[in-house]
Amino acid sequence: MSQNRQGTSAALLSLHQQRLLLEIEYHTEREAYRRQTETIGLRRKVKRGDAWYPIRCGRSYYNSLNQLVVEIHRTGDDDDIEHNFEYGRPVCFFQVNESGKESKIKYFNFTCTVNYADGDRMVVIVPDSGRVAEIQNTEHLGVQLFFDETSYRLMFEALDRTMQARDNRLAYLRDLFYSKQKAAVFTFAPLRFPWLNPTQEHAVNEVLRAKDVMVVHGPPGTGKTTTLVEAINETLHRESQVLVCAQSNMAVDWISEQLTDRGINVLRIGNPTRVNDKMLSFTYERRFEAHPDYPQLWSIRKAIRELRGQRRRGSDNYHQKMDRLQSRATELEIRIQSELFGEARVIASTLTGSANRLLDGQKYATLFIDEAAQALEAACWIPIRKVSRVILAGDHCQLPPTVKSIAALKGGLGKTLMERIVENKPEVVSLLKVQYRMNEKIMRFSSNYFYDGKVETAPQIKYRGILDYDNPMLWIDTSELNCREEFVGESFGRINKTEAELTLKTLEDYFRKIGKERILEERIDVGVISPYRAQVQYLRRLVVKKEFFKPFRQLISINTVDGFQGQERDIILISLVRANDEGQIGFLRDLRRMNVAITRARMKLIILGDAATMTRHPFYKKLYHFIHPENPEETEEPENPERPERLENPERRDSPENQKNPS
């Protein structure tokens, strides 16, 4: 009993600390938003993908969930800029007064929510019809992301509820996760899955045996999603329905798509980041309007709006009609909702999306959290209150959660629930050990440094390459080429123009070796990665200007490390940017980001960076000599002498540009 009390006390103390750190992060982000709104120029916001200007308002209408929405179209010349608008994010509108020498921005005093965004078109949910008229009748209109109060409110509520839990399943899981107490398991002979490799098969069996918690640790290319889909499918042989969540909309889209392809009925709460018929087909909104009873419901809602427009509120007849119509509409809504949830085997949403009113009162035996190593612990507690056991999947050696406050980061806000469980309960962790993505040499450095050498390459792709006798890894040292970093823009983004030009020249030379016809016929794809947003934007401009790359535009992606999370390419080029006399590398000391960058490549990895600057850090020194083992003493396979560093926030250490906005 005393042990239980100690476990509860430790859990409550840690969660209370989490809440204090989250408050620091909340105030830091709110202040950063205020400062950005007041000081960062409009052009800069547009380039960062946080604003659209100018825009044109399209039609307004009520969507299938009876929300008033308005269409927004981006009409500027910035359609090649990747924006950060996506489902659920709050936005605000503004008007630009362009009279006089200086443009003045006037913000509207209401906020809206993105319903979905698709290329240059976005649909936003508007509070009322008066606001729609205000938007549609304004010239020189723009829209920008707004500070997300809702996500913080949900995380604070989740932490409070978790701390207050007593004598229930939530309290049990809380105390278990914060203690060394063994998690409960079922005992049965292992099931066979011949289409999986032994470590994947073991992981699926461990998921089925777990009564409380289990972690699927999936290093790059090891088939984490394949394993998770199999585990979910097997769980559904034992349970009628499961809840599947992830930190970002993109991650929810990916797992939902894989489950749907497997023939599993998925109901996606929220809208996808890629708006196409396949992705929309499993959303709640699309299913709702496809229901046979929906036309009748739409007619009743239309009648309600028309009745309200008649303004006969004083008569008894008005109230009787309105009550009758609203009662019938509610009855139909409940029936449609009940049928949709009754048919679905998987309910999928983001972690904060699991607080949607549609899920009020719903309980599930099992919660699967994908990409759990990228989620703040507070966000994970939002759906945990609805379930009996938790399965986490991810890789804590890849991208961490985004934390903007250095103080909160140093205090431990960046430590995820997955990391906590891995530390406290190594026996519930199942490591996937066979990777199917990279050439052996590319994989070997990452495996030895981050995964104690436990990850091996599948035989069929061990020597995969593009050219015969090609070296799969190359580091081009820019130290003798006067490639110096510099600051640009209002927020002092880091850029290295000479290195950017050399990066594209290197790609051009490699393309000439492969041959244009083969590249186009085999669709050999390329990822150009830089940790810095300013460098990414400069590289994108250079590619557009270069005539040589015109036939290959669809095969070349240029983005930050965060933008490439979960993706892979045949060829990867990494522009490190940093080049200075002091050996300062800033947030490039966050080795988990570099782990992501180097493991995106299937067959060829080319790193461009100033070796004199970068190799002052032991990790980059090991990497450089692993790729170019001129010194015999440096040819040993890398070992990880310490835990990958958890570092100060890149957005503060260097610049707000280096990282994509969190979802």
Image (tube, rainbow, N blue to C red):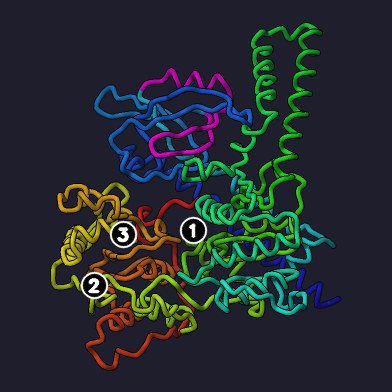
Report if residue 153 is visible in the image. no
Q: Amino acid at mark 2?
A: Leu
The residue type indicated by label 1 comes to Thr
Is there CB contact under 8 Å for labels 3 and 1?
Answer: no
Question: What residue is shown with label 2?
Answer: 467
What kind of element bears circle 3? Answer: loop
Determine the secondary structure under disc 1: loop
Q: Is residue 478 visible?
A: yes
Point 50% across, 18% down: residue: 133
| Residue 302 or residue 579, whichever sits in front | 302
Q: Which residue is mark 1?
A: 402
Q: Viewed as shown, does residue 475 lie left or right of 259?
A: left
**Which residue is under mark 3?**
525
Query: Which residue is pictured at 34% across the width and 80% down the height?
Result: 441
Q: Position of residue 516 (x, y in %)?
A: 19, 58
Give the Cα distance between marks 3 and 2: 14 Å
